[in-house]
Image (spheres, rainbow, N blue to C red):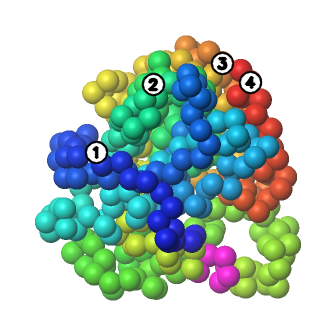
Amino acid sequence: MPMTTPRDYEVFEAGDVTLQGGAVFPQLRLAYKTYGTPSAARDNVILYPTSFAAQHADIEWLVQPGGALDPGRYFIVIANLFGNGLSSSPSNSAEVLGGAPFPAFTYHDAVAIQRRLLAERFGVTRLALVYGWSMGGMQAYHWVARYPDMVERAAVVCGSARCSPYNHVFLEGVKAALTADPAYRDGRFVSKPAAGLRAMGRVYAGWAMSHEFYREEVWRAAGFNSLEDYLAGSWDGAFARRDANDLLAQIAIWQAGDISRCDQFGGDFDRALAAIKAHILLMPGRTDRYFDPRDNEAELGRLVNARSAALHAIPSIHGHRAGNPANNAADRAFINAEISALLQR
C-alpha cells in the first residue's frame, strides 16, 4: 500500500464538527482526489469512498479510460475515509486535539462530511453513482439510506448495511493480534508495533482469501514458491506503511457500522433499508468471508422502495479480494461489466 507523496490530493477544511457521538472535532479535514470534469448539469458525478487502510492511490486502478469509472465521461471523487492517514486521523491530529484522545467516528459522520464537500466545493446535489468496496461499500449503503433523494445508483461491492456479528468477531481477532505488541500501552501505540503489524497481516491472510484459493495454490501464479513465501511476501508487510493507531480508529468505524444507528432511523434496520430509493447493485464475493453473501441476500428483500435491486455475486475464489482485483483480470472484467450495466439504468 504505497504512501501518497508528494501530495497529489486536495483537502476540504470542514471546520469544527460535532460528531455523531457528541464530541466536537476541531479543524476536521477530508482529503480527496478528483478525476475528470463535472458536466454543466453536474449529473455525471461518481463518489468512490476508500476502504480499510486504503488511501486514494490504492483504489484508483478502477478509474481508467474505457473502464466503468471513465474520467472521460464522469467526474469521480475519491473520498479518503477518516483514520486513513490523509483525512483527519490519530496520526495527523495530535496538535488540533491538544493531547485529547482521538474521538470515535462513524460512517454517518463520514458521509455527512462527504456530502458537504460535494455541495460546498463542487455544487453537487445529485450523484450518478456511489461505488464502494468493503468499508467503501458500507459507506455507499449509508449514503443511499441517509440521502435517498441525492443518489441515483449505488454499487455495494463486498460490503453490507451493517457489520455482522461474524465480521465483528473477525475484527476482534485483528485487534487482538495488533494490540498484543508491547508498543500498545494505555489504549494507544507509543511506537511502531512491528510484531503486531506482522501478526495482523497473518490473521488477515486467513480471512481475506478463500479456502479454494489456498487449496488450489493460486498464489503460485504470482511467482511464490511456497505458502510461507506467499504469506511473508504478501501479508507480513501488508499494513506496515500504515500508522497502527489509525488502523484501530478505522476498525472502530467498521465495527460500529449500521445504516440504522442514527436519529433518523432509531436503530430500525428494516426502516433504514426501506428508505433507500436508488438503483442498488449488491455485489458480494462468492467466497468472501468478511461480508458473507447471505447478509446481502437478507438485505435484498428489504429494499422494498429501491428503483431496482439486484444481487450479482462475483464468481471468484479470491475471497474478499475479489472486490478489489487490481491484479486479477477476470474479476476486474466482471466488476467493470456490472458497473457499466448499472450506469445504464
Q: Position of residue 245 (x, y in %)?
A: 34, 69
**Earlier-in-chain disc, 3 versus 4:** 3
On the question of residue 77 being in view, the answer is yes
Callout in the foreground (1, 4): 1
Binning the other alpha carbons within 10 Å of mark 4 as few (below 14), some (14 to 19) or many (20 upward) gives few
Residue at the image point whose x is 19% and y is 62% from the top? 96
| Magenta stretch, residue numbers | 231-236
Whole-number angstrom distance, CA of label 4 to CA of label 2: 20 Å
Q: Position of residue 330 (x, y in %)?
A: 85, 52
Q: Is residue 275 left or right of residue 20?
A: right
Displayed quadrant of residue 181: bottom left
Whole-number angstrom distance, CA of label 1 to CA of label 4: 34 Å
**Earlier-in-chain disc, 4 versus 2:** 2
Binning the other alpha carbons within 10 Å of mark 1 as few (below 14), some (14 to 19) or many (20 upward) gives some
On the question of residue 111 being in view, the answer is no
Return the residue at label 3: 308
> In the rendering, which numbered label is found on residue 344?
4
Residue at the image point whose x is 72% and y is 79% from the top? 230
Binning the other alpha carbons within 10 Å of mark 3 as few (below 14), some (14 to 19) or many (20 upward) gives some
In this view of the protein, which residue sits in the foreground, 325 or 43? Answer: 43
Look at the magenta stretch and give its main secondary structure: helix
Q: Is 3 included in the stretch rendered in magenta?
A: no
Mark 4: amino acid: Gln
Residue at the image point whose x is 38% and y is 57% from the top? 87
In this view of the protein, which residue sits in the foreground, 52 or 344? Answer: 344
Q: Is residue 45 left or right of residue 67?
A: left
**Element type where label 3 sits in the image:** strand
Return the residue at label 2: 125
User: With respect to residue 206, does 109 lie above or below?
Assistant: above
**Earlier-in-chain disc, 1 versus 3:** 1
> In the rendering, which numbered label is found on residue 14?
1
